[in-house]
Image: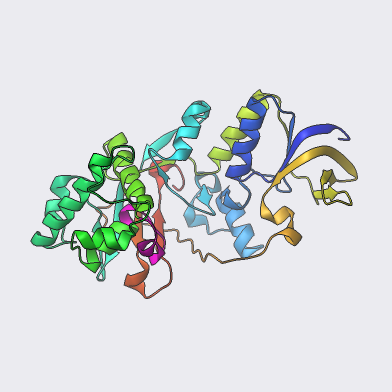
Amino acid sequence: MDEEYDVVVLGTGLKECILSGLLSVDGLKVLHMDRNDYYGGESTSLNLIQLWKRFRRNDKPPAHLGSSRDYNVDMIPKFMMANGTLVRVLIHTDVTKYLYFKAVDGSFVYNKGKVHKVPATDMETLKSPLMGIFEKRRAHKFFIYVHDYNETDPKTHDGMDLTRVTTRELIAKYGLDDNTVDVIGHALALHRDDRYLDEPALDTVKRMKLYVESLARFQGGSPYIYPLYGLAELPQAFARLSAVYGGTYMLNKPECKVEFNEEGQVLGVTSEGETARCKKVVCDPSYLPNKVRKVGRVARAIAIMSHPIPNTNDSHSVQVILPQKQLGRKSDMYLFCCSYSHNVAP
């Protein structure tokens, strides 16, 4: 392995695999290594035996759960916006030929102790119990403003500079109540906490427009899509792209150590006594523990259920957003549900 490469990539998370694919397409000599024997890194998809091994050590999964191969359980589950940046990257790189996607059935929000569908059409908005009749009229005017807003056309700005006007000030102009603001900020703009209210409104408006564009793309009940067989399919697809353009992959490589010179510049990566020389290293944080610091934590729980989530119209795939204010927390909770319809469980 004592060769010289333009870039060595450590870890097979989605970001690392996208980058190695794009760099390989650009003609760079890329070596991609991972200490694990599977793709996806921390965001991999595990079968039932791998899942039990990771969390229950030596226990075996119960026989009644069925075949291990029928499970692809995401460690960091995420739905994708149908018109989001990642989807555009997939289309641009033609990686879509390695993947199959399916729309997600529904988007829901937890409000005042109940689960409600996030309205996907004008008709659903009129029928939704999330707002009263007068509030719906005010919200409708706000949604029209967002829909018509064009960053390059001052006529659509209604005299407001959204790079300076805060989201709180914009919403106050339409007289919307806190309940509606909660739904707009967390279920449509997908902010994780309420800091956005005191930040420039442009970001929130762009997020809402992306939600509507994604909703229109598949004409479904939600703006989300999700790959069949779990999210680990994404890094694998970019790994194939990299390999097609000459990228080299080495999984199951223990103790990948990044080597530096006295000036702190990268020299290469050493594993099993061999060094791959390079001038650039891209890696996930776990490969450089002394150069990163922890700034927060995410708590996750995995439930294997024999039924759909109640009050979601028996949806086979669904996202339920629980806004922070509804829970008395500092940040939102996201409930992600998938099933046999996306080939992640029997």
* Pick the front one: 177 or 273: 177
| Residue 289 visible within the image | yes
Q: Give the left or right position of residue 263, taking residue 20 as reference.
A: right
At 58% across and 43% down in the image, what residue appears? 14
With 120 as the anchor, is 329 left or right in this view?
right
Q: In the rendered structure, does residue 191 fall within the stretch colored magenta? A: yes
Rendered image coloring scheme = rainbow
Q: Quadrant of the N terminus?
A: top right
Asked whether residue 83 is drawn in magenta, I would say no
Q: Position of residue 336 (x, y in %)?
A: 41, 55
Q: Residue at x 49, y 64 (%)?
A: 301
Q: Is residue 177 left or right of residue 102?
A: left
The answer to whether 169 appears left or right of 296 in the picture is: left
Instruction: Name which residue lies at 56% across and 66% down.
Output: 297
Image location (x, y in percent) of residue 208: 31, 48
The answer to whether any part of residue 318 appears in the image is no
Residue 182's place in the image compared with 256, above or below, is below
Residue sitting at x 26%, y 62%: 181
Q: Which residues are magenta?
A: 187-200
Q: Nearer the viewer, residue 155 or 118?
A: 155
Q: Nearer the viewer, residue 223 or 47?
A: 223
On the image, the x and y values in percent for residue 22 come to: 61, 31
Compared to 114, does 306 lie above or below? Answer: above
